[in-house]
Image (cartoon, rainbow, N blue to C red):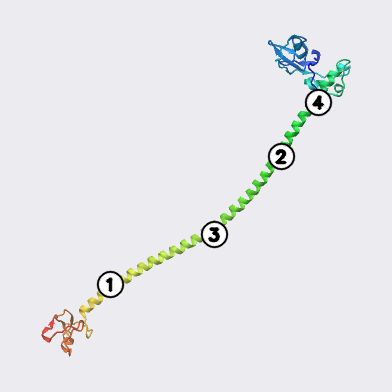
Amino acid sequence: MKKPLKSMTIHASFVTDFGTRGKCVNCVNASEFTAEIDSKIYCKSCGSRKFTKSSVKYEKTDAIFACPASISGKQRCSVTELTYDEYYVGSCCENAAQWTYKTGKLFRQKTVQLIYENARKDEDTAETRLENADKKVAEARNLLEKATQNQINSDRSLGEKKKWRKTVQKRALFLANEAMKEDNSDLEADETDEKEIENRKKRKMDDEEADKLTCKVCLEKYDNEHIEATIIPCGHKSCFQCLSSLPRKNCPTCRARFTKRNLYKLY
C-alpha cells in the first residue's frame, strides 16, 4: 500500500503544542508532514498547492495533541501529550480507539495502515536487535564461563607453583646449611692442618735441638760431667766415647771415614 501523497490536517482545538514545525501558516492547523519554505512552515496539502518545487523535504510534525474521542461525540480523556500517530490510533483511551468521522474515513484507514506497517517494521527491527543482543549475551556468558574456568585453572596452577617453590626453597635451605657445615669443616680442617704443620715444625725444631744436645749413637744427652760432644771432619757430631770406640771409623750419620786424630772435642 502506497503512502498518501497528502495528509489531513488536525484542527487547532486538538493541538496542545504546535512545536517548532507543527503549525501551517496557511491553514493554521496541524498536519502529519510539514516543510519550511521561504522561512515559513507549510503542511503538505498547502505546500503542494502553493509551491511546485519538487526538492521540498517534508518532515514528520513535532506537534502534540489531546485525546480525539470528542470528534465522535464521546467523552475525551485527560491525556494531552499524544504524537500524531498516537492521535490517529487513539492509544490514550477506549473512546479514542473507536473514534471516527463522517468524512475522510478511507484516508484515516490508509494512515493507520501505514502506521501499522511502520510499527511492524519497528517491531522487526527491535526483534532483530533483541536477537543480536541475545547472541551477544550468549557469547558473553560463554566468554564468562571460559574466563571463570581459566580463573579456576590459574588459581589451581598458582597453588601448585607455590607448593613447588616452597619444596625447592626447603631443599635449597637444607643444602645451604649442609654447604655451610662443609665450609666450616674445611675451615676447621685447614686450621687443624695449620696446627699440625706448626706442630711438625715445632717437633722438627725440637728434634734438631735434641740432635744438637744428644749423641746419635748412644742417644744420651751431652753432659759436661759424663759425655763430651765431639765433631768429625764431615761435620756431624756424636759423643767422644762412642766415636773413639767404633771398630770402623765411619760417621754414624753419613758413613764418612775419620781417624782418632780427626776427633775434635766441643765441650
Gap between marks 3 and 4 measured at Cα = 75 Å
Badge 1 element: helix
Gap between marks 2 and 4 measured at Cα = 28 Å
Outermost residue on the left side: it is 261
Badge 2 element: helix
Residue positioned 46% across, 64% down in the render: 178
Quadrant assignment for the N terminus: top right
First in residue order: circle 3 vs circle 4: 4
Q: Residues within 10 Å of mark 2 (few under 14, many from 20)?
A: few
Q: Which residue is mark 3?
A: 167
Q: Position of residue 148 (x, y in %)?
A: 65, 47
Q: Amino acid at mark 1?
A: Lys
Q: Which residue is mark 1?
A: 201
Q: Amino acid at mark 2?
A: Lys
In the rendered image, the vertical position of residue 135 relative to residue 13, given as above or below: below
Q: Which residue is mark 4?
A: 116
**Quick one: 253 or 213, which is closer to the camera?**
253
Residue 234: name its quadrant. Answer: bottom left
Q: Which mark is on residue 105?
A: none
Badge 3 element: helix
Q: Which residue is mark 2?
A: 135
Q: Position of residue 194 (x, y in %)?
A: 32, 68
Q: Amino acid at mark 4?
A: Tyr
First in residue order: circle 2 vs circle 4: 4
First in residue order: circle 3 vs circle 1: 3
Gap between marks 1 and 4 measured at Cα = 122 Å
